[in-house]
Image (cartoon, rainbow, N blue to C red):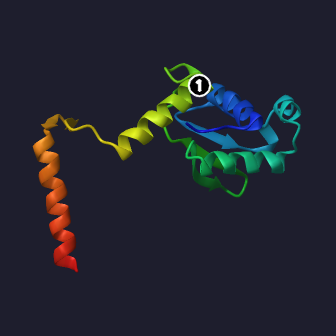
Amino acid sequence: MLNLTDKETILIEYLIGTTEASQVVCYEDFFPKEILEKLNVNFQQVKGIYGSLVNKNILTFSNNINGQYDSYEWTVNVEDYGQGEINTVEKLLKEINTQSNLEENPPSDCYVLGREYTKEDIEEAKQMKLNDKKVAQ
């Protein structure tokens, strides 16, 4: 389970409520002063908190828009303005941990694009991958 600082938690709560199309922005001119005060930081320090959330795989850096502001995306599906299922920090962390666990330990049977893959299919694919590595060496 990810551990968050108090500042990260406060920023995430704010960002969940301001998400638009899975994107969040870091724009000094529009960043609420009350959030800066609640965090007890200046805007440059807020950018560092965004960076920390990227390092913890909560956000991904998307791009810098005309040198004016940075755009980020959630690593999980956070819907517009906190209206979806992920609308709290706790639910966000639970979903991130669930996805992380699935990546590390995929289920033995799974569906991809409507096709059911059995444990045997997955084992066969793993064996083919091992054989490809041996051939490449």
| Residue 59 percent coordinates (x, y) | 58, 44
Callout 1: few (<14), some (14-19), or many (20+) C-alpha neighbours within 10 Å?
A: few
Amino acid type shown at disc 1 = Glu
> Across the whole image, how many numbered discs are drawn on residues?
1
The residue that label 1 is drawn on is: 90
Residue 1 lies, with reference to residue 53, above or below; the image says above
Most extreme residue toward the bottom, as rendered? 137
- Relative vertical location of residue 40 with respect to residue 63 in this rendering, above or below: above
The C terminus lies in quadrant: bottom left
The answer to whether 125 is drawn above or below residue 102 in the figure is below
Nearest to the observer: residue 131 or residue 19 = 131
Left/right of residue 17 with respect to residue 120 in the rendered view:
right
The quadrant where residue 107 appears: top left
- Residue name at image x 18 percent, y 74 percent: 134
Q: Tell me what residue is drawn at x 37 percent, y 46 percent.
A: 104
Q: Judging from the image, what secondary structure is the residue with disc 1 in? A: helix
Residue 43 relative to residue 76: left or right = right
